Image (tube, helix red, strand yellow):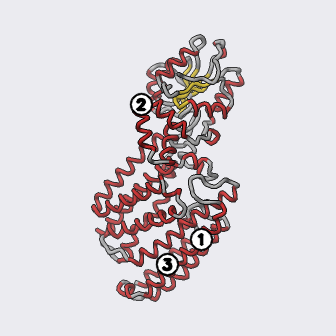
């Protein structure tokens, strides 16, 4: 049975009702995808239950997701142009209705939150109110006076055909052509379209700098041939595309939590700048291309890349909610990049490098958590729902970060004192000068985080920080001098 919030009054044709779609129209999101990824992020094992629900029908799946959804209608990315059209209709005395294929629980929550609708129509566990089903329901309700309809996608074509006036927003090019062919003379509301900059932000292209780590084993082994450099470049590309795919997947899972964050709410998916469907399609495409490039390197490299994908996916779904396990997993993801670089160019992976990188990247991961907690403390936000940390843990996290960072420097000093360094460097004494540079950088990173001058990612901060860049050049110069 279809549901409306209140009886729909019959109105005169000069006050024709305005009916507004929800997903992709009133809100720049898709509640089915949103609640689906939220549920999988909460409990990955629910995939079995969700598949069973889908076999019984899409309406059943929507009802199942709506029952367990932690849904906040106030956080949704509402479209300003559609809200303006609704307000205009209200000022003219026209009744406005919400009609959506989403489940009735979610639609009612949105309608109650906005408080501007005379009634609403939605799917329930029996009927999926989409396409022809929606058109038939609206035709039945408004047969005496007709209605105008605002929609956005191909599923809205039957409704537009039945409406007196068709209004579209963010309609794909193919849908626009179909509307023109049907002679509907549809009105198209202005809408912001994603640009290449929006996509680079979603794919975290600026984070590709982390994948430069695959070149480190090549540099430390002094293997500078055309073939080894080529293999390292392919490894860099494979890791970058794989990481982008997982970043998009992580954003889909964290969508609702990101909208409640003071800065993450501006991300392309959380803000609705990129449609969720496009993001869902992008994930397997990115992973497939990454796998194809990885296969060009070697099967061993593919195994390491697969391990990286498994760990980072486990982090997205489970590990990031485990206190301290999350930062260890983040540190391991950096170490895997180093291992991948060694496998790609077929050099032995140093145990010294393994020990140093574990401590160093553990420190960076803890600084990242420190900054996230500090933002919440300063903004008066509650404790993070998707992280197992308390606001009172701030000082402890800072202490752990300092301990890990200084342990990394201790390992580096022991490496310089070892016999292994003499086989690679003619003047290893120059490497000692790297220790004070590292001490300075770790200490300054902690100070900048404490002063709230750092973003949530210390590596992104270092790439834009003048002092960090200078420190990096000094370290590079000292290594060259030692060679």
* Residue 358 horizontal/vertical position (percent): 46, 71
Above or below — where is 292 with respect to 118?
below
**Quadrant housing residue 311:** bottom left
Q: Residue at the location (70% across, 59% down)?
A: 378
Q: Residue at x 61, y 54 (%)?
A: 384
Q: Residues within 10 Å of mark 1 (few under 14, many from 20)?
A: many
Task: Judge from the rendering whether residue 473 lies leftward or rightward of residue 241; answer left or right.
Answer: right
Quick check: marks 1 and 2 in contact, CB under 8 Å?
no
Q: Earlier in the sequence, mark 2 or mark 3?
A: 2
Q: Position of residue 26 (x, y in %)?
A: 59, 33
Instruction: State the quadrant of the C terminus.
Output: bottom left
Identify the secondary structure beneath mark 3.
Answer: helix
- Label 1 to label 2: alpha-carbon separation: 54 Å
Q: Residue 475, which numbered label?
A: 3
Q: Secondary structure at mark 2?
A: loop
Q: Are marks 2 and 3 in contact (CB under 8 Å)?
A: no
Can you name the residue that lies furthest to the top here? 144
Q: Quick one: label 2, few (<14), some, or many (20+) residues within 10 Å?
A: few
State the mark number for residue 56. Answer: 2
In the depicted view, which residue is nearer to us: 444 or 180? 444
Q: Which residue is mark 1?
A: 445
Query: Which callout, 1 or 3, points to the residue nearer the camera?
Result: 1
| Foreground residue among 393 and 90 | 393
- Is 49 placed above or below 362 here? above
Q: Earlier in the sequence, mark 1 or mark 3?
A: 1
Nearer mark to the viewer, of 2 and 3: 2
């Amino acid at each position: 049975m279809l549901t409306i919030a209140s009886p729909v009054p019959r109105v005169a044709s000069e006050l024709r009702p305005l009916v507004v779609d929800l997903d992709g129209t009133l809100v720049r999101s898709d509640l089915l995808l949103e609640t689906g990824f939220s549920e999988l992020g909460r409990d990955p094992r629910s995939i079995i239950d969700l598949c069973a629900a889908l076999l019984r029908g899409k309406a059943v799946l929507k009802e199942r997701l709506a029952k367990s959804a932690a849904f906040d209608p106030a956080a949704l990315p509402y479209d300003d142009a559609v809200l303006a059209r609704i307000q205009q209709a209200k000022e003219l005395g026209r009744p406005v209705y919400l009609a959506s294929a989403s489940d009735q629980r979610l639609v009612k929550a949105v309608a109650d939150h906005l408080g501007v609708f005379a009634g609403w129509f939605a799917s329930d566990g029996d009927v999926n109110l989409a396409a022809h089903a929606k058109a038939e329901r609206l035709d039945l309700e408004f047969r005496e006076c007709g209605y105008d309809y605002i929609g956005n996608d191909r599923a809205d074509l039957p409704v537009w055909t039945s409406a007196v006036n068709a209004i579209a927003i963010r309609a794909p090019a193919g849908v626009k052509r179909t509307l023109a062919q049907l002679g509907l003379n549809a009105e198209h509301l202005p809408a912001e379209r994603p640009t290449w900059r929006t996509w680079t932000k979603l794919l975290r292209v600026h984070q590709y700098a982390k994948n430069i780590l695959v070149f480190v084993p090549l540099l430390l082994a002094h293997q500078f041939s055309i073939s080894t450099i080529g293999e390292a470049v392919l490894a860099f590309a494979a890791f970058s595309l794989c990481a982008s795919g997982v970043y998009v997947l992580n954003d889909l899972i964290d969508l609702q939590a990101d909208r409640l964050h003071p800065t993450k709410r501006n991300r392309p998916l959380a803000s609705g700048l990129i449609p969720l469907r496009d993001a869902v399609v992008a994930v397997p495409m990115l992973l497939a291309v990454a796998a194809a490039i990885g296969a060009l390197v070697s099967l061993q490299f593919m195994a390491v890349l697969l391990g990286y994908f498994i760990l980072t996916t486990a982090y997205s779904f489970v590990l990031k909610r485990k206190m301290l396990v999350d930062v260890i997993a983040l540190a391991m993801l950096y170490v895997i990049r180093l291992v991948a670089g060694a496998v790609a160019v077929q050099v032995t992976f140093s145990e010294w490098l393994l020990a140093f990188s574990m401590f160093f990247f553990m420190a960076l991961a803890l600084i990242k958590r420190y900054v996230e907690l500090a933002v919440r403390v300063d903004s008066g936000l509650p404790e993070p729902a998707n992280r197992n940390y308390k606001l009172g843990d701030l000082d402890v996290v800072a202490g752990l970060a300092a301990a890990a960072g200084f342990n990394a420097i201790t390992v580096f000093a022991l490496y310089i004192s070892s016999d292994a360094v003499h086989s690679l460097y003619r003047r290893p004494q120059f490497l000692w000068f790297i220790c004070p540079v590292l001490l300075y950088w770790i200490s300054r990173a902690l100070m900048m985080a404490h002063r709230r001058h750092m973003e949530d990612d210390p590596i992104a901060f270092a790439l834009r920080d003048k002092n960090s860049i200078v420190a990096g050049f000094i370290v590079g110069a000292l290594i060259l001098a030692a060679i």
